[in-house]
Image (cartoon, rainbow, N blue to C red):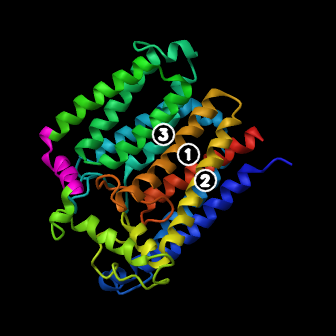
Amino acid sequence: MSLNYNKILITLTVILLTLGLLVLFSASAVIAQQDYSDTFYFVKKQIIQGVIFGGILAFLASKLSLNFWRKLAPLFFILNVILIILCFVPPFKMTSTNALRWIKIGPISFQPSEFLKITYPAFLAAVLSQYNLKERKRIFGKPFLTFLFSFGLISGLMFIQPSTGTVLIIGLASLAIYFTSGLSLKQIIVLVIITIIVGSYLFKVSPYRLQRIISFKEGEKDPLKSGYHIEQSLIGIGSGGIFGLGFLNSIQKFFYLPESHTDSIFSVLAEEFGFVGSMILIVLYLSLVLVGLKITSRALNNFNKFFAVGLISHIGFQAFINIAVMTKIIPVTGVTLPFISYGSSSLITSLVSIGILSKIASVEA
């Protein structure tokens, strides 16, 4: 009897969402009580703006024809780029923060760069699926040049914001798509050279990026300043031991750990549920990615396959990067934990991605 990967996909998503709301309540209760006199403030916003609204959009996405995404992918990508540009333009830009990642339209505010995790894979999949393998492998072929130009455009905009973590996730997901479509050795060499050149330039014009790497390597020498965030994260994770301190018993969330309910929520989870709870979460993510890849392998055409790879890759890479940052495997970058961290834009993007994957799974069944 063959497995129903669509049902498994949805079941794993519901489990992650449920776990996420529980951990979010614990991680955000203290700051919510202090700032809003309501311990459920962030959980309620997450449920209304993220789970419910995102769930409705995911359901609608699961009913849309995949041809709809293929035909309108260029338009969605262009509109997404326009929204990112509006982040720099009054009166749309948010003036309450130094970063220009948010856009405000009336009473609604969101991060348009988050939606590139859907619109850009759709665009890239639509482009690559139009050409044969030989054309996709050419350095000066239209597919590769379109990839370089389009990714360079969105990377430039997001580096200005700055939104380095999102660039990294979209870049890795895009590479997964192109690798699936047939990435040649010469193209890999070109990408490595471009990455080295751009990286060197960014370190020169933005010294804080280099400082993050220095803090990553030598953070324990300055645990109260540059190394404070990651050191507090490691304290929380270490305090959890094997089985954790118990639900609601985190100490780090009492204003020791920065961004305890967003980027750093994994540390709170590890502190309360220990190594066992952390491994369960990692297994859930791995299972979700494996199911997504299985759906990809059963795709009936290139567009479905490339699109599915991009969608599941961004969720998998985002989870890995967040956990790797919190455990000091890689330098600090602002990336939320999918389905767990507070943030409606990120959650909506993840849920819609699951909705589209569900559609692909049902088509291939």
Number of other residues with Cα within 10 Å of mark 1, as a class: few under 14, some 14 to 19, many 20 or more: many
Query: Which mark is drawn over residue 288?
Result: 2
Q: Position of residue 306 (x, y in %)?
A: 57, 33
Using the numbered discs, state the Cα–Cα distance from disc 2 to disc 3 in whole angstroms.
Answer: 21 Å
Location of residue 166 with respect to 283 vertically, above or below: above
Left or right, 290 with reference to 159: right
Q: Nearer the viewer, residue 227 or 110?
A: 227
Is 207 inside the magenta-drawn segment? Answer: yes
Q: Which residue is mark 1?
A: 312
Three-letter residue code for mark 2: Leu
- Which element carries disc 3, helix, strand or loop? helix
- Disc on the earlier residue, 1 or 3: 3
- Quarter occupied by the C terminus: top right
Classify residue 28 by image quadrant: bottom left
Is 142 inside the magenta-drawn segment? Answer: no
- Disc on the earlier residue, 2 or 1: 2
Question: What residue do we see at 63% from left, 64% from top?
Answer: 14
- Disc on the earlier residue, 2 or 3: 3
- Magenta: main secondary structure: helix
Question: What residue do we see at 62% from left, 54% from top?
Answer: 287
Number of other residues with Cα within 10 Å of mark 2, as a class: few under 14, some 14 to 19, many 20 or more: many
Three-letter residue code for mark 1: Ile
Left or right, 203 with reference to 135: left
Query: Which mark is drawn over residue 119?
Result: 3
Q: Nearer the viewer, residue 13 or 216?
A: 216
Using the numbered discs, state the Cα–Cα distance from disc 1 to disc 3 in whole angstroms.
Answer: 13 Å
Question: What residue do we see at 17% from left, 62% from top?
Answer: 226
Q: Can you see residue 40?
A: yes
Which residue range is magenta in the image? 204-217
Location of residue 326 with respect to 187 vertically, above or below: below
